[in-house]
Amino acid sequence: MTALVLDDLRAGYDRDLPIVKGVSFTVTKGEAVCILGPNGAGKSTMIKAVAGLVPCFGGRVQLDGREITGLPSHELVRKGMGFVPQTENIFTRLSILENLQIAAQLLPRQDRARRIEAMLAMFPDLSSRPRELAGALSGGQRQMLAAARALLNEPQVLMLDEPSAGLSPKLVGQVFDTLRRISDTGVTLLLVEQNVRAALGLTDRALVLVDGQLAHDGPTVDLHDGKLLGELFLGHRAAETRA
Ligand SMILES: Nc1ncnc2c1ncn2[C@@H]1O[C@H](COP(=O)(O)OP(=O)(O)OP(=O)(O)O)[C@@H](O)[C@H]1O
Ligand SMILES: [Mg+2]
């Protein structure tokens, strides 16, 4: 069963200067996929376009067989799209509980308390001190809270933009353990990640985006030693196929 389809997606900030230049791929339900690519390749822009936060200029996006291209982000959340941006993904001046309560606003009133309880049960680090300011959490715990905010709405697909950025190796391990638990619940994961080694244990499949286009789609393990990735990042492969 298909969870997410991108079909020739074009997106960006200015119609005359597309950043995502015709990207197509399909993600199966329950799959965990990582998206790699050099800085400025358009990874964040692409997942923001899918999440309804950046304009789509052409092509289509389907979630669970339904067309969702260009829908606003709050509507996408209701349809099962979860997105955790790289930065500003929690309210640091509010408590853990308040962060969850705000995320729960999109749920029907009668479901809110139950979903918040479910998230606290899933993340013991958060449930042990619900009144603590989110700004006092460690980097890894902030990522957990950001993920909990997205998961509260029971997404079918959860997209995360570099959840391990700036974290110590120990905290990267914690974040990936959390992502593994999320994946094990059946949620489809799409993960932008620079850390191939960390992504390897979680994702079986890797997409490589170079200059707004898909340069590679294959098993994550093929990218482990860095050789193929280096070639892809430098565009050698693309040059070879053109020659
Ligand atoms: N808000 C914006 N307005 C205009 N251009 C932007 C905006 N955000 C990003 N860009 C441009 O879009 C291009 C792709 O950026 P994007 O952040 O999507 O790349 P990325 O692959 O996520 O890079 P990184 O690995 O550094 O996170 C870059 O040229 C960037 O300057
Ligand atoms: Mg980015």
Image (cartoon, rainbow, N blue to C red):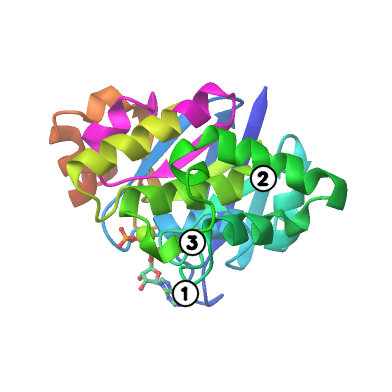
Q: Secondary structure at mark 1?
A: loop
Whichever of labels 3 and 2 marks the residue nearer the N terminus, that label is 3
| Residue marked by disc 3 | 89
Labels 3, 2: front one: 2
Question: Which residue in the structure is indicated by mark 1?
Answer: 17
Report the span colored magenta: 181-205
Magenta-drawn stretch contains 184 = yes
Q: Are the two marked residues, 1 and 3, in contact with CB atoms closer than 8 angstroms?
A: no
* Mark 3–mark 2 distance (CA, rounded to whole Å): 17 Å
User: How far across and how far down the image is residue 60, in percent?
Assistant: 67, 50
Could you say whether the residue bearing mark 3 is in a helix, strand or loop?
loop
Mark 1 and mark 3: Cα distance apart in space: 27 Å
From the Cβ of disc 2, is ligand 2 less than 8 Å away? Answer: no
- Mark 2 highlights which residue? 116
Is residue 71 placed above or below 185 in the rendered structure? Answer: below
Q: Nearer the viewer, mark 2 or mark 1?
A: 2
| Crowdedness near tag 1: few (<14), some (14–19) or many (≥20) residues, C-alpha within 10 Å | few
Q: Where does residue 161 sit, x and y in percent of width and height?
A: 42, 52
**Residue 83: numbered disc:** none
Identify residue type, mark 3: Asn
Above or below, 45 relative to 77? below
Q: Residue at x 75, y 59 (%)?
A: 105
Q: Is residue 187 above or below residue 76?
A: above
Q: Which amino acid lies under the numbered mark 2 shown in the image of this protein?
A: Ile
Which residue is rendered at x = 67% and y = 57% of the image?
101
- Distance, label 2 to label 1, CA atoms, is 41 Å
Reply yes or no: does residue 80 show up in magenta. no
